[in-house]
Amino acid sequence: MLYEKKDIILHVEDLSIAYGDKVIIQNVSMMEHDVVREGKVQGQTIAVLGRSGRGKSTLFRGITGLVAAKSGRVIIPDYSKAVTDGLQPAKLVAEGDVGFVDQKYTLFRHKTILDALLFSMRNTNLSGKEKLEKAMSYLVEWGLENVKHQYPNELSGGQRQRVAIIEQLLSSGHYLVLDEPFSGLDVGNIKNAKASFDLIECAHELNTIIFSTHDIELAVELADSIYIVGYPKKPEGGLDTIGTIVAHFDLKKMGIAWRDGFDADHLELTNEIKRVMLES
Ligand SMILES: Nc1ncnc2c1ncn2[C@@H]1O[C@H](COP(=O)(O)OP(=O)(O)OP(=O)(O)O)[C@@H](O)[C@H]1O
Ligand SMILES: [Mg+2]
């Protein structure tokens, strides 16, 4: 499948993050480009995998500017500035630049589901009627219509998570970072979430979804780029206890991105990823 790499959309440069004195991840570097395919609108889908506690959520807090870097930096394009000399000006990521659905999916406690969704569209230029129609179509599609006047504490975990995802779908710019968006979803909800990924991907060239999951097959099916966060091997044997990127798979380069469904090549990569994860 032919494609071209254009502007850099995410550059994580030698990032390390600590909580207090405890370094959680270090030497993390990631580089992603706007991928262009002829005759298509092609966004980017990036998956982050790794065993529990290796630092995926911590990395996401760094990428979204929610925690400060101990060293290194995260650079994203600054779309508020005009292109000069063919280059999109870049900026250091700051909190609020990137839509983020936390693994703990916090919702506004004092707003009903419908009100929360309407509120999330406050910075768009849609009319009140358009906002309502859009919110309602998501609620219906994601099986939440009957809880639209309820408050978050009156919802099941999976329902709350879907609301959090929809909130970000409605409000975020080109970036969407989702920490374990599929956990707690049933088979129908997963189908909806996958369909939403597809919609986001083909809605704008620059749209970029970064998500983590423990479902390796799903990541291989959906992503065009996969990073594994793990503990690197120590020279003297054994594993270090600070997370880093231990492997990166570019499914575009491997020729297995953007296929319909899951096939034998995807299975092979799944097994390779499992091996990497078990050793890190
Ligand atoms: N606020 C915090 N303060 C101190 N340590 C933390 C904090 N949050 C996470 N940690 C520690 O950082 C490490 C990485 O946690 P993180 O949540 O990033 O892992 P993860 O890869 O997302 O795991 P999971 O797959 O279980 O979600 C863990 O050892 C955890 O105990
Ligand atoms: Mg996590």
Image: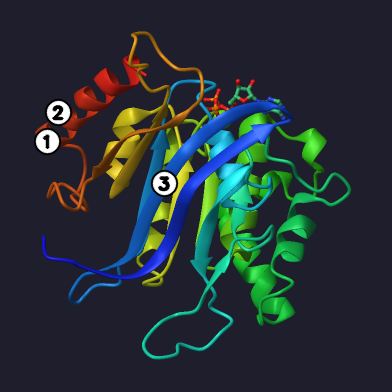
Q: Which residue is mark 1?
A: 265
Residue under the point 33% across and 63% down? 33
| Labels 3, 1: front one | 3
Q: In the structure shown, which secondary structural element does the residue marked by tag 1 occupy?
A: helix
Q: Residue furthest front?
A: 236
Mark 1 touches mark 2? (CB < 8 Å):
yes
Q: Is residue 169 above or below residue 4?
A: above
Quick one: quadrant of the N terminus?
bottom left
Q: Distance from label 1 to label 2 (Cα)?
A: 5 Å
| Labels 3, 2: front one | 3
Quick one: quadrant of the C terminus?
top left
Q: Tell me where residue 278 sits by quadrant.
A: top left
Query: Is 170 left, or right, of 29 in this rendering?
Result: right
> Three-letter amino acid code at disc 2?
Glu
> Three-letter amino acid code at disc 1?
Asp
Q: Is residue 70 visible?
A: yes
Q: Which residue is mark 3?
A: 29
Q: Nearer the viewer, residue 63 or 38?
A: 63
Q: Position of residue 73 (x, y in %)?
A: 55, 54
The number of numbered discs placed on residues in the rendered structure image is 3
- State yes or no: Cβ of the residue under disc 2 lies below 8 Å from any atom of ligand 1: no
Q: Distance from label 3 to label 1 (Cα)?
A: 27 Å
Label 2 Cα crowd, 10 Å radius (few <14 / some 14-19 / many 20+): few
